[in-house]
Image (cartoon, grey):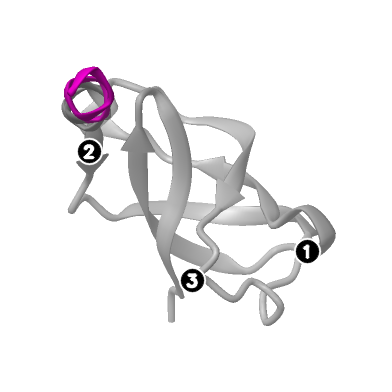
């Protein structure tokens, strides 16, 4: 019984936030081996993050092999317990 209660509390404690907000960015560097992009991005209003250059981990369902430095993109973030990763990405035309 204690294991069931612990498991239920763990599930409740896991906070998932998927932002429907698209953010524009420029690809600076692609690290496919680590599933990571280094981006210069615009402000991400939904989480109060100013525009800056930083790296983002990429969701396993996202293929970053077609992106290269200087590509203009837009992306969406997913947050799980404060950990952020890109859950959607597309090239801006």
Label 2 environment density (alpha carbons within 10 Å; few <14, some 14–19, many ≥20): some
In-image side of 21 versus 65 (left or right): left
Identify the residue at horizontal 78%, vertical 64% (top origin): 32
Q: Earlier in the sequence, mark 1 or mark 3?
A: 1
In this orientation, which residue lies closer to the viewer: 36 or 15?
Answer: 15
User: What residue is shown with label 1?
Assistant: 32
Residue at mark 1 to residue at mark 3: CA–CA distance? 13 Å
Label 3 environment density (alpha carbons within 10 Å; few <14, some 14–19, many ≥20): few
Identify the residue at horizontal 52%, vertical 71% (top origin): 62
Label 1 environment density (alpha carbons within 10 Å; few <14, some 14–19, many ≥20): few
Look at the image and say whether residue 79 sits in the magenta stretch: no
- Mark 1 vs mark 3, foreground winner is 3
Q: Quick check: 16 above or below 27?
A: above
Q: How many marks?
A: 3
Q: Quadrant of residue 84?
A: top left
User: What residue is shown with label 2?
Assistant: 17
User: What residue is shown with label 3?
Assistant: 61
Residue 25: image x %, image y %?
A: 50, 52
Q: Quick check: 72 above or below 25?
A: below
Look at the image and say whether residue 3 sits in the magenta stretch: yes
Residue at mark 1 to residue at mark 2: CA–CA distance? 25 Å
Magenta segment, which residues?
1-7
Residue 54: image x %, image y %?
A: 63, 33
Residue at mark 3 to residue at mark 2: CA–CA distance? 17 Å
């Amino acid at each position: 019984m204690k294991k069931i209660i612990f498991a239920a509390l763990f599930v409740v404690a896991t906070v998932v936030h998927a932002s429907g907000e698209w953010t524009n960015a420029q690809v600076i560097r692609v690290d496919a081996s680590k599933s990571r992009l280094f981006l210069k991005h615009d402000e991400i209003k939904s989480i109060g993050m100013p525009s800056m250059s930083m790296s983002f981990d990429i969701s396993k369902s996202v293929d970053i092999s077609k992106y290269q430095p200087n590509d203009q993109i837009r992306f969406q973030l997913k947050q799980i317990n404060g950990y952020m990763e890109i859950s959607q990405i597309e090239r801006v035309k």
